[in-house]
Amino acid sequence: MAVQVLCVIPARIGSTRLPHKPLRLLSGEPIVRHVARRARELDFAARVVVAADHPRVVDAVSGLGVDAVLTDPALGSGTERVATVSGLPDHAHFPIVLNIQGDQPFFPLEAVMGALQRVRVGDPIGTVGSSIVGNDLTDRNRVKVVVDAAGRALRFSRVMPASFAWQCEVDVLYHIGIYAYRRSVLKQWLRWRPAPGERTEGLEQLRPLHHGLTVGVARVGAPVASAIDTEQDLAKAETYVDMATQR
């Protein structure tokens, strides 16, 4: 029997770069509703839960056949919301938890399967990376990850020194905000202090590296549409939807 997966979608309205991000409309519907609908279609996700920080986010996914939990607005990251939801009694039997961030309406199945596979082969945390387009290492809106030959994350950053791209023993990828965790990792996460640089860069994924955990990075072959973090991203997403509709 396949291992059942709990899929949690953290979504908060307190984003600074794109205020009320989960509720912003994409093709006439809130962004978080697009993500939740797509997650519901994953046949290996036994339960899909939106971890919200505001009742309006809960209302935005009503009628989709997914659960929604109102979490403490003071929680510092999406993973803290995921850990809180996974710790509820109804979710105690799920050994693997999938985190699909609420600003990823176009997440590909290949990326989800890649993150899960890293955990299934032994990594405590799995995530995803894709090739950098045009060797651009300086766009602060795109998080990068340095990986070793075994696909283990060595570093996450918004601005990556160009020297990393020329070291044959490592590779630099765009990081995609999809994670899989062993349940035991999420129990630890809430007890860990933030890592140096975590708050200044806004990168929660620095925390497990700082505390000595392996983060496996699955590489997806095709470029992946970026998360919606800015007004420009939202405009690009509208164009993407329009083009897909016309095909």
Image (cartoon, rainbow, N blue to C red):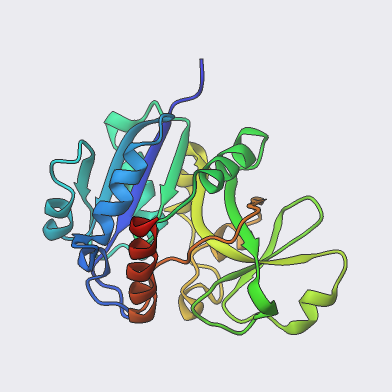
Q: Residue 85: horizontal and vertical position, in percent?
A: 31, 44
Residue at (63, 41) in percent of width and height: 118
Q: Quadrant of residue 39?
A: top left
Q: Nearer the viewer, residue 200 or 240?
A: 240
Residue at (46, 74) in percent of width and height: 202
Q: Is residue 168 visible?
A: yes
Q: Quadrant of residue 207?
A: bottom right
Query: Can you say whether 85 is above or below 171 in the image?
Result: above
Q: Residue 115: horizontal and vertical position, in percent?
A: 57, 45
Query: Can you say whether 71 is above or below 205 in the image?
Result: above
Q: Residue 179: horizontal and vertical position, in percent?
A: 50, 50
Q: Is residue 105 visible?
A: no
Q: Quadrant of residue 175?
A: bottom right
For the image, the number of numbered tags is 0
Q: Residue 29: horizontal and vertical position, in percent?
A: 19, 59
Query: Can you say whether 126 is above or below 13 in the image?
Result: above
Q: Tell whether 90 sits left or right of 178.
A: left
Q: Nearer the viewer, residue 245 or 36?
A: 245
Q: Tell whether 132 sits left or right of 35.
A: right
The C terminus lies in quadrant? bottom left
Q: Nearer the viewer, residue 93 or 10?
A: 10
Residue at (19, 41) in percent of width and height: 64
